[in-house]
Image (cartoon, helix red, strand yellow):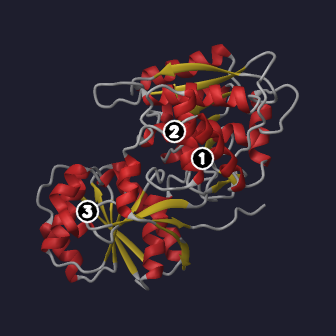
Amino acid sequence: MTVRFGGLRVFRMAAAVLLLAAVATSCGDDDDAAVARDDAQDEGQPSDRAEAAAGEPIRIGIVSPGKTAASDLSIELAVAEATVDYLNQQRGGIAGRPIELRACESQGDPSKAADCSAQMVQDEVVAVVAGNTQNVETLVPQLRDAGIPVVFYGASGSIVEDDSTVFVLANSLAGLIDLPLDVAKEEDADKVMAVVPDVPAAVDIYENMAPPVFEEAGIEIDQVAIPLGTADMTPQMQQIADDDWGVVHVIGTDAFCISALNGLTAAGYEGRITMVSQCLSDATREAVGDTLEGILMSVPAPLDADLEDIQLYKDLMAEYGSDIDVSDAFGIALYTALAGLEAALDGASGDITPAVVIDTLRTMPEMPLPGSGGLDFRCNGKAVPSAPAICTRAALMAELDAEGYPADYLTVNDTPIED
């Protein structure tokens, strides 16, 4: 059931069913996949044309960190290959021509990200797609100079101000700014406190980017920056509780957020809490316990929800991929970026050049964003005026239950993107 209150749209679900769905890695037989794709068409998802691509390939670059000592994002390339197989076999590729992937792994290294850019220019790709690529500041410049568009799933920092060749399909600022702002409006709270790691990238958001947005809404925003590794934040959280801040927004890794949340509990804070998805892990659930209930958290995709476009993704990965973990958020992020690019280019014809891709993206109508759980995107620079590279205004959030799992999914800032 879907209900709406204020600026938030809520998807009500049974938590026990969702937890079972979250660990499912098998999505049924080919008949089930076909039914799911037919149903998805009714929900505004891409409709299969059942025609194979033919002719000279169109080269699309994929840049991924791959597997590093700190993380393993090798799923991105597996998802990219499966998605391209589907697009080529069922949706006619791009402009009827097959998509040819050119992949490069940056290994999380800034210099290697720059090398990947050089490789993409040499390979004469018409666009580069990245799901959760690190080092965006070194990846983009050479591509921009060559006039090659880069389509990110999510990105933040100064790169989102680039409205020339950069397209960011997910609203990377929503979990940082829109979520606490919307909750403050719903709660009639007149001030929000952000609890952030004391690092420049985090501090800058609430020192420079957020204040004008909150000021326009008549809500005060402030921050307390706490050094990483601080185990006991009770003194800082006690001050927040004593000063009666209506909403507290926490950003950081799970370890940082555990300290902040436990500090708020110890201080007797009774206001609303919001946080980013990086806060939540099994360690958080174990350390914080049922105090997670009612917290609103940004999420990349409702992977455990019974929604048509999520099921479509799972079915496609089962049909065209091999042992792809569909509960991995990094996988669906890459799918969203690649399938979103194809959806925006649907109906294109003639010679597909980087300039044509850029122009088509900038002039596209608003349409469903694949794998997003019902969000729409439009890349005309007006979704988030202060960050014209971002193509989606709304973003997905989850309200947590007593065990720290999503009980409800919500969208914030869910309004049409104007011409």
Residue 169: assigned label? 1
- Looking at the rendered structure, the kind of residue marked 1 is Leu
Q: Nearer the viewer, residue 317 or 160?
A: 317
Q: Position of residue 418 (x, y in %)?
A: 74, 63
Q: Is residue 227 left or right of residue 319?
A: left
For the C terminus, the image quarter is bottom right
Q: Which residue is mark 2?
A: 28
Q: Residues within 10 Å of mark 2 (few under 14, many from 20)?
A: few
Residue 23 falls in which quadrant of the image? top left
Residue at (45, 31) in percent of width and height: 324
Q: Amino acid at mark 2?
A: Gly
Disc nearer the start of the sequence (3/1): 1
Q: Residue furthest right?
A: 350
Please tell me whether mark 2 sits on a helix, a strand or a loop: loop
Q: Earlier in the sequence, mark 3 or mark 2?
A: 2
Image spot of residue 39 (x, y percent): 67, 51
What separation in Å lies between label 3 and label 2 (alpha carbons)? 29 Å
Q: Position of residue 323 (x, y in %)?
A: 43, 28
Q: Is residue 249 visible?
A: yes
Q: How many other residues sit within 10 Å of disc 3, few (<14), some (14-19) or many (≥20)?
A: some
Location of mark 3 (residue): 403
Mark 3: amino acid: Glu
- Of 2 and 385, the residue lying toward us: 2
Q: Nearer the viewer, mark 2 or mark 1?
A: 2
